[in-house]
Image (spheres, rainbow, N blue to C red):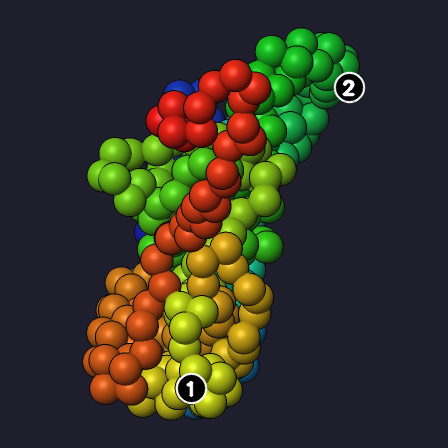
């Protein structure tokens, strides 16, 4: 009986209106909002904590993806859901119901966009898996693909939201299609370079730090951007080349070389005795193989030159660095100088032999022979 007496005034209090709605509706709405936000937030923390522990013990990365998606779930999403459930306690106008629906839809779309970005990052990480964090290819991949994928995700989210709120997406897409064609024609070079950068990323013909030769340009890759690639030439200046030009050109990547092939010719004089000529190939092989970081291929008496007997030597430098190759060639040249001096073999140099033939002039009638000779 006492409880009934106490409840009656409280019921009467709840029946009072505030802002056009009874206090009872406000109380139920607040409780619904708080409980929804609290339960969802608590669930997120528990699931994140437990899944993180499980992910540490497993080798698969799918559970890591789930943990990342849970972490990307924002508080604004819980607030929007709490508002959605709480507003059902009120009798709202159609316009206000529409605005609340749009607000909740916007929050849901934005949250889905965050999850989509999480999936994009997961896919990119899988693509560059196995490469160190400071690897140039990994840096290039995460920048270029991440940029393009984010544009795609947020564009899709925007179109989905517009369609959800009743906008005529078909007409919008048609308008954008016509305008997009005009923009694409105006920016075809820029778009070509953009897609070429994706081709460079996926095919990896070169990465930052590689030394390449493209046409007449020789340099080291310093940066691969969305539109252009920057090289530092061997003479010091910076060279900027459009990505589309790089993709459509023949590129020689010197850093991918495992070894360098080197060919040079040695000429000796025609006066060199035949036994020494016969031993010269073996002597050149001995000289080349005695130098470190070399792999001998062949040494042959190639041809009879205009003033020399020409020997062609072919070998490989087992370190692709250009400076190393020149150092090796220098050591070989010095060794050839020393061995030829020891063997008394002379290097040939351009010479000409002039044969002078003395001819007695024929006698001239009426002229004495002495005068004719003079």
Q: Earlier in the sequence, mark 1 or mark 2?
A: 2
Residue 276, disc: 1
Cα distance between the residues tagged 1 and 2: 88 Å
Helix, strand or loop at label 1? It is helix
Question: Which residue: 25% across, 34% down?
Answer: 237
Image location (x, y in percent) of residue 130: 45, 74
Q: Few, some or many C-alpha atoms within 10 Å of disc 1 (few <14, some 14-19, many ≥20)?
A: few
Question: Which residue: 34% across, 48% down?
Answer: 220
Image location (x, y in percent) of residue 117: 50, 49
Q: Quadrant of the N terminus?
A: bottom left
- Residue bearing the label numbered 2: 170
Q: Is residue 309 above or below residue 281?
A: above
Image location (x, y in percent) of residue 243: 51, 35
Q: Is residue 97 above or below residue 132?
A: above
Q: Is residue 250 above or below residue 317?
A: above
Q: Few, some or many C-alpha atoms within 10 Å of disc 2 (few <14, some 14-19, many ≥20)?
A: few
Viewer-proximal residue among 111 and 349? 349
Q: Is residue 40 visible?
A: no
- 197 relative position to 50: left or right: right
Which of discs 1 and 2 lies nearer the camera? The answer is: 1
Helix, strand or loop at label 2? It is helix
Viewer-proximal residue among 123 and 171? 123
Question: Which residue: 31% across, 41% down?
Answer: 233
């Amino acid at each position: 009986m006492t409880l009934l007496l106490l409840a009656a005034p409280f019921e009467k209090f709840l029946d009072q209106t505030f802002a056009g709605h009874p206090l009872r509706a406000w109380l139920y709405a607040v409780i619904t909002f708080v409980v929804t936000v609290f339960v969802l937030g608590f669930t997120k923390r528990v699931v994140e904590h437990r899944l993180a522990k499980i992910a540490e013990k497993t080798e698969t990365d799918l559970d890591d993806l789930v943990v990342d998606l849970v972490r990307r779930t924002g508080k604004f999403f819980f607030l929007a859901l709490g508002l959605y459930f709480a507003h059902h306690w009120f009798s709202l106008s159609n316009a206000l119901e529409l605005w609340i629906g749009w607000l909740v839809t916007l929050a849901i779309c934005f949250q889905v966009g965050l999850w989509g970005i999480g999936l994009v990052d997961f896919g990119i990480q899988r693509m560059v898996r196995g490469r160190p964090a400071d690897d140039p290819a990994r840096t290039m991949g995460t920048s270029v693909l991440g940029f393009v994928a984010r544009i795609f995700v947020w564009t899709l989210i925007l179109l989905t939201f517009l369609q959800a709120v009743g906008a005529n997406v078909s007409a919008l897409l048609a308008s954008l299609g016509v305008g997009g064609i005009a923009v694409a024609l105006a920016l075809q070079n820029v778009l070509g370079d953009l897609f070429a950068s994706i081709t460079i990323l996926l095919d990896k013909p070169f990465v930052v730090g590689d030394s390449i030769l493209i046409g007449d340009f020789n340099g080291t890759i310093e940066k691969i951007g969305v539109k252009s690639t920057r090289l530092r030439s061997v003479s010091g200046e910076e060279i900027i080349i459009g990505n589309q030009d790089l993709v459509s050109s023949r590129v020689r990547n010197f850093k991918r070389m495992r070894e360098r092939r080197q060919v040079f010719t040695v000429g000796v004089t025609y006066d060199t005795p035949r036994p020494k000529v016969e031993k010269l190939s073996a002597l050149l092989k001995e000289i080349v193989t005695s130098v470190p970081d070399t792999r001998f291929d062949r040494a042959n008496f190639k041809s009879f030159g205009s003033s020399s007997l020409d020997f062609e030597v072919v070998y490989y430098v087992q370190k692709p660095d250009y400076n190393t190759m020149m150092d090796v060639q220098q050591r070989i040249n010095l060794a050839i100088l020393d061995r030829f001096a020891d063997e008394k073999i002379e290097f040939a140099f351009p010479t000409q032999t002039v044969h002078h033939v003395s001819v007695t002039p024929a006698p001239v009638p009426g002229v004495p022979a002495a005068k004719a000779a003079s």
